[in-house]
Amino acid sequence: MSIKIVLYVYLLFVTLDNYNLILAQTNVFTNVNIIPMDSAHILTDHFVMVTDGKIAYIGKEKPARIPKKAHYIDARGKYLIPGLIDSYAHIHEKNLGLFLANGITTVRNAPGSAFQHALKKLTDSQELIGPRIYSVGPALTGSITAYHTQGALANAEEVRFAVRETKRMGYDAVFSYVTISPEVYKEMLDEAQKCGLPVQGHVPYMVPYKDYIEGNQSSFDNLVGLMNLQSGATYPEERLAQFADDYRRTGKYVIPTLTIHKARASARKIDSLKNQSSMKYVLPRQKEYWRLNSQQYTYSGAPDIVKTFYQNGVQLLLGSDGGFHFVVHGFSYLDEAQNFAELGISNYDILSAGTVHAARYLGWDKKIGTIEVGKEADLVLLNRNPLEDIRALADHSGVMIRGSWYSREQLDEMLRTLEKEIHEMPATNRMEFFPKPPRSFEPYAQYEIYYKSVRCGDEKIYISQDGKQQSKILSYNSIDPLCQRNTITEWTFQNDNIQDTKVKRTSIEGTTEVSMRPNKGYTSVTGQHPIFGTINFTDSTDVHRITGGPNTSINLDVDVVGNYYVLFKHLKPLDIGQTDSVISKKIELNPEEWGRQSIIGNSWYKVTRVIANDTVANHKKYEITQPGFNGSPDFNFKSVITVNEDGVIDHITFNDNVIIKKVKWSAIK
């Protein structure tokens, strides 16, 4: 069985047998009250028939022709609404069921990356059960970036290329990040228009107000740029009213994501956030990451902005920011609906913000957002009338996605299965999907990888020496979800000089293979990536001493351990207090940069030997500084590495969060 198929099986919440059975049937809702969302009226005691994934019939009378094997859904006294749309969330391979379980049949993932874009392809092809995914491209920034993974875009040529790449890779929209500069912003808008891509994202705080309000950016997310997130300070009431009038006049959508502002305003109450009942569906590493990286916001300014915008006719959309710190996917969307209600927004307008208006914003209003014959059958069957109480959204009998019906019982079983998988993670031996190493390789060292106290991966190192001045290092690295990755990196040396570095990575995207060979004056890079496509280019060879493999996974920025073995192989002997710098060219595979920068990057290691304070004799200790993906000095990372008397890495601490421990070879099968 291929590792890609294994990943699919690992991700599914419902057996494929049940899934195919439901998909093959015609579904008929009987005696249902329909809230079609073309207006606030209700169609009482109707029949709705779904065939081939689309709404085929709506009427007071029973359809004249119903297939004999049709599946009937008794909906007497219940309310049928269009499937809900979360206009701002962050997806990964283990959270798709949480959306469906909460009635959300479409998710806008923003900003995105290659592994999330792969989830769209898998759900579109129905290889993976989940909501429809509107896939926004990676964030386009200026020369200033908020994260080391973001590719800096300093000029017109770079941003235009990034927009074209967004189009080429099949994303649905361009995402403008808050730090984008005025010059780059104009070029982005122009190129996106040429490519036929909508522009969405943050309020660009460095761009003049007139330029972005009159430009063709269609939405503004998170209230970023409209308020000080730390103090809660916002603009005077009259200025907000002017903003609202301009947003309404120019047809801008606003996705306030009040839930994230509330959650981060409660960051000081971290224990209560950790103990939310929905946290049992959050991956252990993600939960620990949230705990360590939570920042405190002030909620006070956010409601005033949203209330002013609503009262002045700005089109608001429901977006949860699910996946950000302590905002649990799916459940947080229902919280957002309640946040709207607390501001005096009518229940019908809240429903519109999560259905018909959201579909129009995505450009998908011809297929979803209302209940009409011919539209896609994405539906939620509620037990109560949401026009009377918006909390009825949390009380449903089942959800239909692409014409497939999932009862409340089935959805609850999905949740129980997910909870069990998370509790037992990892469900399988991390190393069982790697091939057996060639016979020339001998086991050398193996490691357990932790994010603080959460074990989240393993790595094995093998060594090969053929006796003819050629040697090899082989690394098998496996990281748990989110963004599960199995990475094989192999270095070939001739007289200790690197001849070739090869990476084979298997993940939800598929299989990526890249080879990097240094030559005199240039480095040849070839391979294939399931999202980026064919890789074939040369890069200037700086005076680098080593070539390296990739970092491990998202939110786990440490190198594969094999990189450090290559580093120490080329490090000059150091006494305590001495420093050496080693320039490296790495196969980065960073999905948030563009073109060749997303595949390889120039890097360096500044290595200082320090006093080893452990009690083991002959151990050496080093502090290593290295840059992040985009090379900005603002994101330098620090590792502390202990090496034993045989030159074997014993322990790595990376940025005080990631801990890598050497264990006995027999400890990991």
Image (spheres, grey):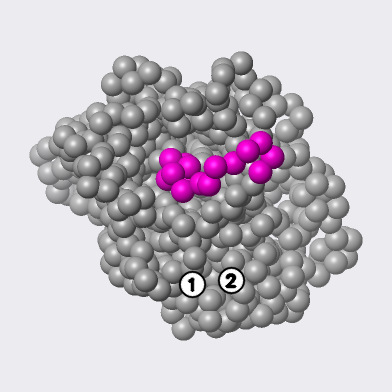
Three-letter code for the amino acid on which mark 2 is drawn: Leu
Dominant secondary structure, magenta: loop
- Camera-side residue: 347 or 118? 118
Q: Nearer the viewer, residue 125 or 399?
A: 125
The amino acid pointed to by label 1 is Ala
Quarter of the image that includes the N terminus: top left
* Span colored in magenta: 564-578
Q: Are marks 1 and 2 in contact (CB under 8 Å)?
A: yes
Residue 332 left/right relative to 495? right
Let me know if residue 217 appears in the view.
Answer: yes
Which of the 4 image quarters holds residue 596? bottom left
**Residue at (88% x, 65% y) in the render:** 238
Q: Quick check: 546 left or right of 444?
A: right
Give me the disc on residue 162. 1
**Residue 168 in view (yes/no):** no
Q: Position of residue 333 (x, y in %)?
A: 56, 41
Q: Is residue 274 above or below residue 89?
A: above
Residue 467, image x, y percentages: 22, 42
- Dot 1 or dot 2, earlier in sequence: 2
Image quarter in which the C terminus is found: top left
Q: Quadrant of residue 604?
A: bottom right
- Please check the rendered image and state whether residue 170 is part of the magenta-colored stretch, yes or no: no
Q: Residues within 10 Å of mark 2 (few under 14, many from 20)?
A: many
Q: Secondary structure at mark 1?
A: helix
Give the numbered dot on residue 626: none
| Residue at position x 44%, y 79% in the image | 195
Task: Give the alpha-carbon distance from disc 1 to disc 2, as whole Å.
Answer: 8 Å
Is residue 567 on the magenta stretch?
yes
> Is residue 568 shown left or right of residue 349?
left
Q: Relative to the observer, which residue lies in front, 513 or 351?
A: 513
